[in-house]
Amino acid sequence: MDPRTIKPWFTGLQQGIVERLEAFDGQSFRSDGWERPGGGGGLTRVIEDGNFFERGGVNFSHVMGEAMPASATAHRPELAGRRFEAMGVSLVLHPRNPHCPTVHMNVRCFVALAEGKAPVWWFGGGMDLTPYYPFEEDVRHFHRTCRDAVLPFGGEAEYRRLKDWCDRYFFLKHRNEPRGVGGLFFDDLGADGKTDLDTAFGLTRSVGESFVDAYLPIVERRKDIAYGEHERDFQAYRRGRYVEFNLVFDRGTLFGLQSGGRTESILMSMPPVVKWRYDWHPAPGSPEARLYDEFLLARDWV
């Protein structure tokens, strides 16, 4: 696989998503191109203090290096020491209104290279939703859109596999709780030689291109709901879980930092306002308690 042949799709995806988000928010994203000293670079597109988004980023990166970082070989030790090339689009959006969920999406491809050995390539990605207040209609819409993106590439069974993988992956082990309500997650697609390039890239494209339809209808429904300091305080508390996951468990964050990526671009996923409280619990019967009791668990949302 030659990454140069698929790069136009990744850059086009970034541009298309940014255009849709700018039209929704009414404010433009800042464009920040960068180069990596070890090879490659990218384009960071960021919005801060927008009309709707408190902070968000839609990033493209294409980097290469002489040795795979530890985060990429922890579960693939046979690739340790190989040269690599990696490319992807990653986004995180943090709305200001607590009734609107945070969302994450990532699609990526890797190639591991070694002298005298065949290249090993694979794709990965997915998207997941992190609501602060419980709206079942929103979560079901998000999961139905995720399912529809996967159905042409393995049917219901493949959707269930990627949905369950997402539930397991976006889980804070030290808290024994999910980060949010899940969605899709996949990795190493094609690395074992059982999935051909067209299928692996096709699934990746389908997931990336379904993002806007999965997310924008939700925030369009909720953006004008009134809120106060109570809701903002709970949002900031729950955002703490987002930070904990990204800095402790997230493969993309660890890969970026370990591979010498651009720190500002990698950490643009962090929410702008966050709070931690000691041993806090929601009031029984409150909307906050309903989020914990009915939403932050593995469910069949479709």
Image (spheres, rainbow, N blue to C red):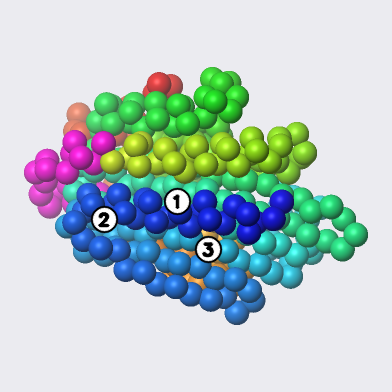
**What's the amino acid at mark 1?**
Leu
Q: Position of residue 70 (x, y in %)?
A: 69, 61
| Residue beneath the point at 47% across and 31% down | 149
- Callout count: 3
Secondary element at tag 2: helix
Q: Position of residue 261 (x, y in %)?
A: 55, 70
Work out whether residue 216 or residue 233 is closer to the camera in this orientation and state it.
Answer: 216
Residue at the spot 52% in from the left edge and 51% down from the top edge: 9
The image quadrant where one finds the C terminus is: top left
Q: Main secondary structure of the magenta part?
A: helix
Residues shaded magenta: 217-238
Closest to the observer, 226 or 12:
12
The quarter of the picture where residue 240 lies is: bottom left
Residue 226, above or below 43: above
Q: Is residue 236 visible?
A: no
Q: How crowded is the residue under tag 2: few (<14 C-alpha within 10 Å), some, or many (20+)?
A: some
- Which is nearer the N-term, disc 3 or disc 2? 2
The three-letter amino acid code for the residue at tag 2 is: Glu
Residue annotated with mark 2: 22
Q: Determine whether label 3 and label 2 are within 8 Å by CB.
A: no
Give the spatial CA distance, label 3 vs label 2. 21 Å
Mark toward the start of the polypeptide (1 vs 2): 1
Residue 70 visible to the viewer? yes
Q: Which residue is mark 1?
A: 13
Up/down of 38 relative to 88, above or below: below
Q: Which of disc 3 and disc 1 is earlier in sequence?
A: 1
Per the image, label 3 sits on a secondary structure element best described as strand
Q: Residues within 10 Å of mark 1 (few under 14, many from 20)?
A: many
Across and down, in percent, residue 135 comes to 25, 31
- Name the residue carrying label 3: 61
Residue 239 sits inside the magenta stretch: no
